[in-house]
Amino acid sequence: MKQTPILVLDFGSQYTQLIARRLRETHIYCEIVPFSEPIDAIKARSPQGIVLSGGPASVYADDAYMIDQKILEMGIPVLGICYGMQLIAHLLGGEVRQSSAHEYGKAEITIEVSSPLFSGLDAAQTVWMSHADQVARLPVGFKRIAFSDNSANAAIADEENRIYALQFHPEVAHTKRGAQILGNFATEICRISPDWSMRSFAQRQIEEISQVTAGKKVLCALSGGVDSSVVAALLYKAIGDRLIPVFVDNGLLRQNEATKVQEIFAEHLNASLITVDASEIFLTRLTGVRDPEAKRKIIGHTFIEVFEQEAKKHQDIAFLAQGTLYPDVIESVSVKGPSKTIKSHHNVGGLPENMQFKLIEPLRELFKDEVRELGVELGLPEEMVHRHPFPGPGLAVRIMGEINHASLELLRRADAILLEELKKSGYYRKVWQAFCVLLNVRSVGVMGDNRTYENAVAIRAVESSDGMTASFAHLPHDLLELVSRRIINEVGGINRVVYDISSKPPATIEWE
């Protein structure tokens, strides 16, 4: 098992993945594992530091999430955040109790004791609190190093044993110097050299893929999006002509998408692309299906069937590679810890259990912006690297309700107009993702002197860095007006356009 400089133990906080992001931004590699990870498995990774994440539970509850206390006795630095702090105090003999005043949102802390954790920081710091419990009595050997008006022990430390704990969340953007705090833990306390980069990640993945595949062929599920394109480029460098790239046209693609994918692949990736037109199979199986989860699972299972059929035409294919990202994993199923399932992604929660392939998912621990950085490192063109994300289930999750040819055609035409105008205006690169959603809701309109009763579409445009959180994009009103006018005038069957101003959370980026 490879060495992991810092391990983050996940107790179910929706912020856990941000801990990994902030550390990686300081060029420290880390991975997230469940809080229940056996201590032998942790030792096998030879971590130089451990972070205990936040979480929704209370340490004094009957079903509280616990760790093996020996983790705190391994002799390596530990940083507890929120629930992680309370757990450290609880396990080491301190007292945790419900706060008299819950604390959610921005707060001001005062650093009162010099500590390497706060190296380079002023005494007054703006942080983000999110807790209902707090440490009321410190364990033996700990001292308070920071406080706030509502948290007498906002930060504590056992400097001798290098165990530190924070009541606030340094990983969120609202904690102004939070990234520096995490960086201090890694470099000043754990003594880790900040040398992780996309170049080193690519080199490690290429070596691992070569070793794992052991001369066998790999079928690569290619969509034409940045994720699968980066996977294909990585695989080609690792195994050369043992890569079998397959593009499946599932009938749920954007306008002219299949042609564009083939053109881009032929121009920029030095491998022969196999294209399979399976559109009728997918659309037949989706007939009458309205539930979003059912759609995703049907699509996931059908993709695998198509790939398995293609694999039979080749010898020695033992692996299926796909562009699963960490946000897909977080939203689909709690594989890292007790995080709540948001929705199944077709390539995670939607996969059948009895697959004939072993999965290769080299991007599984990366965020979208990191994947783009990796694409640049691998020499992929900017046009490919900076394409807007497109979901694996395609337009199936952008059509409310049942999928059919007529609905797909309406959505394709509307979506093409939106993307065309975004590119003309220069806003395509300014937003993270933009697309149309067919609502399958009819409303009354007037065109000329005639009454219409036709469909409505919603425009969704968001700004984000990793897809885990997002804010709706503040597109100019004149641009929105132009897109709306063109869609209504040029796409027969649509008489109303609305703009989605929801952020994530509470909404997801895709509607289904």
Image (cartoon, rainbow, N blue to C red):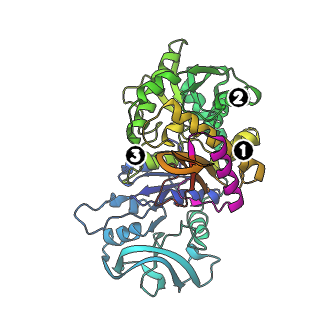
> How many neighbours does mark 3 have within 10 angstroms: few (below 14), some (14-19), or many (20 or more)?
some
Depth check: 119 or 396 in front? 396
Which residue position is annotated with label 3?
333
Q: Which residues are magenta?
A: 466-494
Disc 2 marks a residue whose amino acid type is: Phe
- Examine the structure image and report whether residue 492 is included in the region drawn in magenta: yes
Q: Of label 3 and label 2, which has the lower sequence position?
A: 2
| Front tag of 1 and 2 | 1
The residue under label 1 is which amino acid type? Glu
- Chain-order first, disc 1 or disc 2: 2
- For marks 1 and 2, give the CA distance: 22 Å
Residue 462 picture location, percent across and down: 60, 56
Q: Is residue 243 above or below residue 123?
A: above
Q: Relative to 344, does residue 50 appear above or below in the rendering?
A: below
How far apart are labels 3 and 1 at the CA level?
35 Å
Q: Is residue 274 above or below residue 439?
A: above
- At label 3, which amino acid type do we have? Val
Mark 2, residue position: 265
Q: Residue furthest left?
A: 62
Secondary structure under the numbered disc 2 in the rendered image: helix
- Give the image location of residue 73, x and y in percent: 39, 62
Residue of label 1: 420
